[in-house]
Image (tube, rainbow, N blue to C red):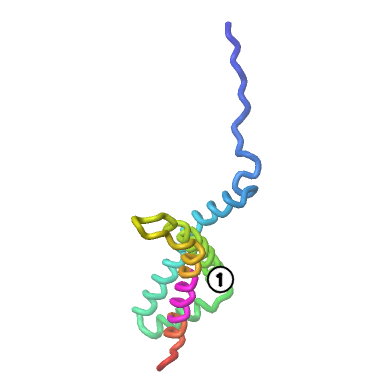
Amino acid sequence: MSEVTRTAPARVPDGWWTGHTRYRNYVLFAGSGMVLMGVCVMLLLALQALAGGSESWQAFVTWLGQAPVLALSSFLLLGTLFFSIRWLRVGAKIPSVKLGFMPAPAPALILVAHFGGLVAVSSILLLILSGVGR
């Protein structure tokens, strides 16, 4: 008769995603898809209110002013900023490959271009949405 060898129960390694910065950032980046989905839902609600006329839009703006909705909007903003910064940092590493006879641009130059573009586009949108130039 052979004895059955007992095995230890499976367990998650100590501090799996919270104990390692790279894992934690990866899991947070993957979870930011939910944040972006929340932003899309808010945008769709805004477009629906806009299509409903001025009364519907005013009701939506009033709803946006409530404390829980402001907290949710702040969370969505922070999550979107985290996603954007992480994506732009990762995107700076992608073109670091030499293509043909042209040397690859320095990753620092790409990083500055990415963040410069983000600031420029955000500034232009902010100016347009604030009504500058009317």
Quadrant location, the C terminus: bottom left
**Dot 1 crowding, Cα within 10 Å, few <14, some 14–19, many 20+:** few
Q: Is residue 35 visible?
A: no
Membership of 114 in magenta stretch? no
Give the camera-side residue of 96 and 94.
96
Reply above or below: 106 against 74.
above
Percent across and percent down for residue 74 are 56, 71
Q: Quadrant of residue 58?
A: bottom left
Side of 111 relative to 44 (left or right): right
Which amino acid type corresponds to the residue marked 1 in the rendered image?
Ser
User: For numbered disc 1, what is the local secondary structure?
Assistant: helix
Report the residue marked by disc 1: 74
117 falls in the magenta region: yes
Please tell me which residue is depicted at 46% across the width and 77% down the height of the picture: 120
Give the quarter of the image for residue 46.
Answer: bottom left
Q: Is residue 40 above or below residue 59?
A: above
Residue 70 in the image, given as x and y percentages of width and height: 55, 74
Q: Which residues are magenta?
A: 115-124
Residue 126, x across and y down, in percent: 46, 82
Q: Which SS type dominates the magenta stretch? A: helix
Q: Residue at x 41, y 55 (%)?
A: 97
Nearest to the observer: residue 31 or residue 116: 116
Instruction: Please indicate whether residue 52 sits to the left or right of residue 34 in the image.
Output: left
